Image (cartoon, grey):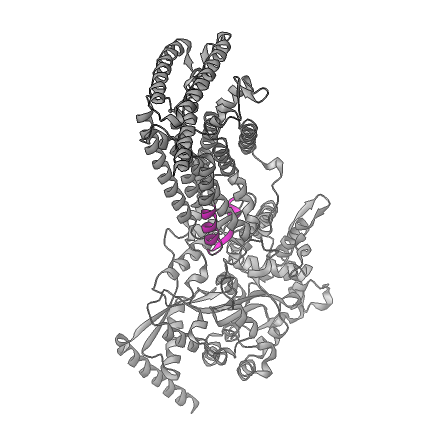
Amino acid sequence: MYKIYKNIINILYFIIFCFNIVNAQDKKVINILLSRPEINESRYLENYNQIIKEYFSTRSSLNNYDINFSFCEPVADDGKDIIQDYEHPMFFSTNFVLDEDYPKNFNCTIRELKESKFDMMILDNNFIFSDDSFVKSIYLNGKYLIRRITDYYEDLNDHGVKEEDTKHHDADILNNGHFKDPRFENKRFFGLPYERDFNLLYYHNKYEAIKDILSEKELTKDNLNTNVLYDSYLEPGGILSIGLKDYDEILSAFDEFISYKYGIPKENDVKSFDIFYNRDQNNKKLDELFYSFRNYTIKYSGQNIEKTLETTPEQAYYSFINNEKIFLKGKASFYKKLIDNPNIAILANSLPDNFSTIKEKFLIINNNSEKPKNDLVKIALQLTSPEIQLYRAEVLGTIPTFDLKNFNKNEYSNAYCTKNPVICNIFKDIKPIQVNKFFKKNKNTANFMEIRMVVPPAIKDGLIKNNDTVLEETFLNTLDLEPIPMSDMKTPIVIINGINLIGILILVIAIIMVIRYRKHPYLKAISPYLSCLTILGMIISLSFIYIFALSSVSKTACRLSYVVKVTSINLIYLPMISIIFRIYYIYTNLSKVNYGKKVNDKRLIRYVFIILILFILICGMVAFNDDFYIGTFGTLLPLRLNLCVYQNMLLYYLFANIYSVIMFISMIVMTIKTIQVSRKFGEVKFILFIVLLLFASVVYEITFIFLATFNFNNIYLFAIAHGVYLISSLYCAYLLVGSRLLYIRKHPIKNGTYKGNSVYNDYFNTTINLADFIPLKKDLKKDYNKDMDREDEKINKNKNKNRNRSNSSNSHGSNYNNEYINNYINGYNDYLNSYNNTTNHQNEEYIDPIESNPNNYFFNQSLKMLSNENDANNNFYNRRN
């Protein structure tokens, strides 16, 4: 009767299944990505799809949707660059090894998340939040082209998922599907618990007497049933079947052994992580741990360690069911398949001291899916409902996400445990190990995405070579930030940094010297304070590579580094453009007499600071509202280094370069026009050399874009650009103030006077004709004599003009003008006599044009006379009115 009933049910299933095939064309297909099973049966995917479709065909409605599960198929380019970079390091030679399949499969999943092919994915706890850490992996994120994996997950909180819909899940696994994003106040809900799994120790029932053998309890002949059993234990081939070719299994076995043998590491106990280090000759805890694990593995799995490490989980499974090994370390989900096998009789036991790694799987919704998200959420809730979990457990042997430790308090847990008491009794005493959190020492620890890629291969490498050197270096890099010993610093790096610091020191000394001699007329001509601001900008810019490194201390320091960068750019450009603008304004001004109020130093400095403060405020607002974070290149370098990174880094540098180019072009235009009109006044070609600094700055800023691409091949270009910028900065500082400082050292100010004139006279504070002050090129004596002849002619002409002008003046000012002009001419003659007496004793080949041009005194005193005359006229008319 039972067989007839079962046949009728099967016929009904078949009819319904055929009906679904006929109507499949009218349904939309929801594609779900599924991870590959450890035991890869030939028709696994086909059977899985059929089982799920059968469930929905009889028990639930999918709102005219069909479901299709499939695997991710890596392509040739998946993970290719990462594999090549680790095999052939371009910058520093390292000993790190990696699991080549991991970046392939990881990139495959990421690639599908970015597209709309898969509407949902079933991801385990080793993937779902694997990129999460305080310090982001710049290199891996750059290669995978991601910012956060969670950016591709749909937040279920946005779709009104109620507590009633998820209360059947274990609270721990449900919480593990939530993610604390610092950008949001509450946790985000991304993963619905789908199923879980853990490790068991299976054994053939006739060997029950040694079921706890892996706990390394003392063995004697008394607790062995037969001599055959005793001999098998001593066999070189071992008694444990384990698939250590799978890197997940290597990491799982390593974690379980450490937990069982040493009871560490403990959460929030930094000292417990010392077991992963060899601190000194007397404290080699890692050596003790590693060789203990290796001996343990060889003892139970066989002396041929290479053969053990080439055994897949599938091979280990069949080796066990073929009675080649006594024990099998396998997943709890194998239990149904093993007990249903009529050819063997097996029992299950927990691993030593009940420690076991836990694999939790979550169903996430791809936010790039083109299907209505509300429909996807409803279907996701059905796929994780307690009913379908019980169905999959019965048909496939999966472990549901119920609270199995308190199964009497939950009807669904009770229903499962009634049919699977062995699994529930073992799980009740399990001490779970979260592999993705096992190596979390502190905030600087690498994320699991990187740990999973490099730690298991390092363990395997050590097991084969019987050496833990690579494993030690891997732990040193991934667990924490280790200071770089001076012995590890490469000679070129030390030299480059030394030269850079010397260059900065020279510029600091230049600023001090300029401030000290700021009242010297030879320095006043080039605006000492504006020049100091420009040099200060150079210093900050040269120091930015150190600021950029220190910005990794915190996110706040990271944000401030951007503000400092913008400040350095403006400190270089704004004072420089002010100097060039003043020269341009004077030379292109139509008036022959310019009192300099519009281009006065104080006014220009005021404008510079206003613009600078404005930029700082704007950049500060941007910096503290954008997504800044700390990043690292991780195991791509020998030691772990943190850097400051921000989301729109390339955009910011692009803006900085556009801004620099605009300033650069403006100064070029003003410089060219100034040169065109200034040939009859003096030499201004030195501005072209200053423009060279601006060009070097633009190139230097552009190289930061290459640095922001996080491609180490570009660091060589950045180093060269930094060297060029350093040389340009020093050379331009020399052109700007250096040559003048050297001249001043040879011609110091004595008793507050220079060449017999007080440095406090007002004509040194009022710049009239900058052509008299700008030139750096010194004229030969023969040119000086010609210039003196021309100046004498100008003086005679000016005297005649002044006399004519004086005669035509009104009577109220004539006496004043005549007296002033006589005093002026006498003063000027005294100046010429003093000048000639001084120059007659000079035997230098070159004479500076500032000294040799008497028109400086003449022109400034003329302006002073005109100003006094104008004041006198105003007073006269005021009294008259």
Nearest to the observer: residue 289 or residue 92: 92
Is residue 109 shown left or right of residue 65? Answer: right
Q: Position of residue 356 (x, y in %)?
A: 60, 66
Q: Is residue 751 above or below residue 442?
A: above
Over which residues does the magenta segment extend?
613-637
Name the spot of residue 184 as percent of width and height, x first.
Answer: 49, 65
Q: Is residue 770 visible?
A: yes
* Quarter of the figure with residue 348: bottom right
Q: Is residue 409 above or below residue 841?
A: below
Q: Quadrant of residue 587?
A: top left
Question: In the orientation shown, which residue stands out farthest toward the front?
Answer: 880
Q: Is residue 76 left or right of residue 226?
A: left
Q: Is residue 90 above or below residue 169?
A: above
- Tell me residue 141's x, y (percent): 45, 52
- Can you give x and y, in whole percent of width and height, for residue 334 in the image? 51, 70
Please state which of residues 510 and 83 is positioned toward the viewer in this rendering. 510
Q: Which residue appears at 57% of the width and 22% of the height?
A: 752
Task: Specify the quadrant that holds the C terminus.
Answer: top left
Nearest the eye: 853 or 627:
853
Q: How many marks?
A: 0
Residue 196 magenta: no
Residue at position x 32%, y 72% in the image: 29
